Each structure stands twice: as C-alpha cells, then as structure tokens.
Image (cartoon, rainbow, N blue to C red):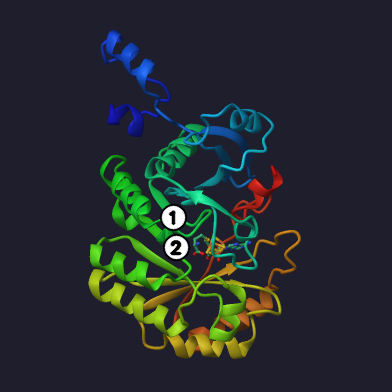
Amino acid sequence: MAEWIYRRNARTFEEMNNLPADLREKLSQEYEVGRSDIIAVQRSQDGTIKLLLGLRAKMKDKKQKRNIKNNKLKDTVETVGIPYVDRFSCCLSTQVGCPVGCVFCATGMGGFSRNLTAGEILDQVLAVQEVANRRVDHAVFMGMGEPLLNYEATLKAIRLLNEEMGIAMRHLTISTVGYVTGILRLAKEKLQVTLAVSLHAGKDELRRRLVPGTKFSLKEIVNACKEYLRETGRRVTFEYCLLDGVNDSLAEARALGTLLHGMNCHVNLIPYNTVQGLGFGKEPHKAIRDFREILENSGLQVTQRVQRGADIDAACGQLRNRFK
Ligand code: SAH
Ligand code: SF4
C-alpha cells in the first residue's frame, strides 16, 4: 500500500488494483487515503507551480466543507514545485500559518492555526508530483511555518521522504528562524540534511524588530549551528532576506561578517518578494552587490538566490492570503 500512496500517487483504495477487490472495498468503507484537496494552482512562466491545498484532517464537519467550496477555509497550506534543468524541488509547509510573526513575511502576517501532521507534509510532495507529472527529488522546508516548532512531524516527514520516496537526505533542507533548542536536538539525530538558518540581521537589536517571536540571540544561534556542523559535518547555510533601507546597511553587513567570521558556512542573500500591506521593499541590485562584497571581504562564501515564480504569488503565504 505504501508503494501505491508514496510512489504511485493513489488518491483512493479503488486505484490499488493489485489488491483483492473485496479488501479494497473494505478499506474504502472504513478508511480514507486522506489526501488533501488541490484548491488552486498557479503556474509561472519559468515552470514553477504553486499549489494551495485544503487539508482534510479537520474537514469532518459540514461547515468546514462548505467553507472549502467557497475557498475560505482556514486550514489551507501552500506548496511550490520548482523545476531546474537537473532536479525538481518542492518547497514544503510545516504549519498552517506561523506563530513567529516575522514582520516582513506574508505567512507571519496571517497568524497561526495549527501544526501539520507528517502525512500532510508528505502529501504536498505527492500533490506537486501529480500536478507537474514529474518526480520530486529535492525538498526544502521553506514554506509556511517554522519546522522546528513542529519537530516530531517534520522529522517523521524527513524519514518518510527518504525511506519511502527515495529522496536523499542530502537533498533535504530544513530552514529555521533559529530555534536553538530545535537545532541542538536535530544535531543529535546526526542526519545528513542541510540546515538553513534565517538571520536577516547582523545585530540583535535589528533582529528583534524583524523577528519578534524568538528569544535567542544571534550568538546563541550561531553557536548552535557550530554544534550542528560538529555533529553532522554539514556546512550550515545562513539566509538573509534583503529589505530595502531596513537591514541592508553596510554596518549590518560588517556585523554579520564579524559574527560568522572563520566559520565553515555559506550565506544566501534572498531578494525580497514584496508583500502588499507590509511596507517593505525589494533591494536594488547595486545595494545587493555592495552588501555581498563586504561579506566576501570577511572571507565568507556568498550566493544570491535566483528569484523563481516572480509572476505568481511566489512568497509563501501570498497565495493563501489571496483566498481569505
Ligand atoms: N520559518 C522558517 C522557514 C519558512 S520561511 C524560516 O523562517 O526560515 C523560508 C524563508 O523565506 C525564510 O528565510 C524567510 O525569511 C523567507 N521569506 C519570508 N517571506 C519572504 C518574502 N516575502 N520574500 C522573500 N523571502 C521571504
Ligand atoms: Fe514564520 Fe519563517 Fe515567516 Fe518568520 S519567516 S513568520 S519564521 S514562516
């Protein structure tokens, strides 16, 4: 049955035609496969697809079912499929909304409803494969929610993605806003997954303003990342979303350079996807270049994320907000 669900995208027991008919019938009466509903699909010119999924777990009552028909259901999550020449990556959500409330993030703006189950996380990969008709071979936990605040389900999903769907651990990336306890716990699992940590500031004062929902200092976060590197041998990625006139000063870049100096890591500069109503702007190219240069002069390896799906509601939480 796992073969049918994980590898062949079955949505019903009836499809599992190598099982005896009476068993299929019995299963259908007592259980459901529990796949989410695909509420909306957006397709970018660059091939990126973005799906809005209606979750099933809480859809037992009639009111919820009515709401989903009217596209007003709160229990919806987004997932994105990003095709590259040599791979197909899926961006996964781990929570409905997010309790951290970063001030520039569309998901943070939408509030928090609940954690996803491991099945609901996995289901996103199945839905993307179904719509794109292509196997997912990489997954990044960079959709809605904070994975390390839903630790058990995230870990279970990681193991299932690896064992049942054949995605290599090294092709899985967990992005966290920097939950030190979660990072240290993950380090002890000694998995080969990539850890990406969203910093967005070089100094604590600015970080507290941008990421109000965490109490950890930058130093504590970086120390936890060093522990992750020691335990797993995996180089950590730091994400920095550049917000025009907010966290792009050269002083902030220097502070970040000092903070990460000498560490075996990699900084990924993310161009901001403007979210209506939040008041933040995208960084001009020249400012990104200057910021990058300072980091490189501190000996850091820096890359710039290529923006994908710019013509659809690419930033997580944007498509969902549209359906509210
Ligand atoms: N909660 C986790 C993972 C989900 S967010 C985290 O914060 O890391 C994944 C990444 O998307 C984070 O680096 C986040 O800062 C970034 N992000 C959020 N909103 C964005 C936007 N509008 N434009 C670009 N990146 C955004
Ligand atoms: Fe949550 Fe990440 Fe958005 Fe912050 S950036 S609100 S942690 S999803």
| Relative horizontal placement of residue 37, taking residue 222 as reference (left or right) | right
Task: Please name the amino acid that badge 2 sits on.
Answer: Ser
Q: Residue at x 28, y 13 (%)?
A: 23
- Is 211 placed above or below 28 here? below
CA separation in Å, label 1 and label 2:
7 Å
**Amino acid at dot 1:** Val
Q: Give the structural element (helix, strand or loop) at label 1.
A: strand
List the residue tagged with mark 2: 175
User: Which of the image's four quarters has the N terminus?
Assistant: top left
State yes or no: discs 1 and 2 in contact (Cβ < 8 Å): yes
The quadrant where residue 43 appears: top right
Q: What is the x, y in percent for residue 140?
A: 44, 55
- Above or below, comparing residue 146 to residue 121 in the picture: below
Residue annotated with mark 1: 140
Query: Which badge, 1 or 2, comes first in the chain's sequence?
Result: 1
> In terms of image quadrants, where is residue 99?
bottom right
User: Residue 136: horizontal and vertical position, in percent?
Assistant: 41, 43
Asked if residue 6 lies left or right of residue 254, the reply is: left
Q: Can you tell me whether the CB of the residue at mark 2 lies under 8 Å from the nearest atom of ligand 1?
A: yes
Mark 2 surroundings: few (<14), some (14-19) or many (≥20) residues within 10 A: many
Q: Residue at x 65, y 59 (%)?
A: 109
Q: Residues within 10 Å of mark 1 (few under 14, many from 20)?
A: many
- Image region (quadrant) for ligand 1: bottom right
User: Left or right of 108: which side holds 7?
Assistant: left
Residue 239: x percent and y percent? Answer: 50, 70
Residue 245 shown left or right of residue 50 in the figure? right
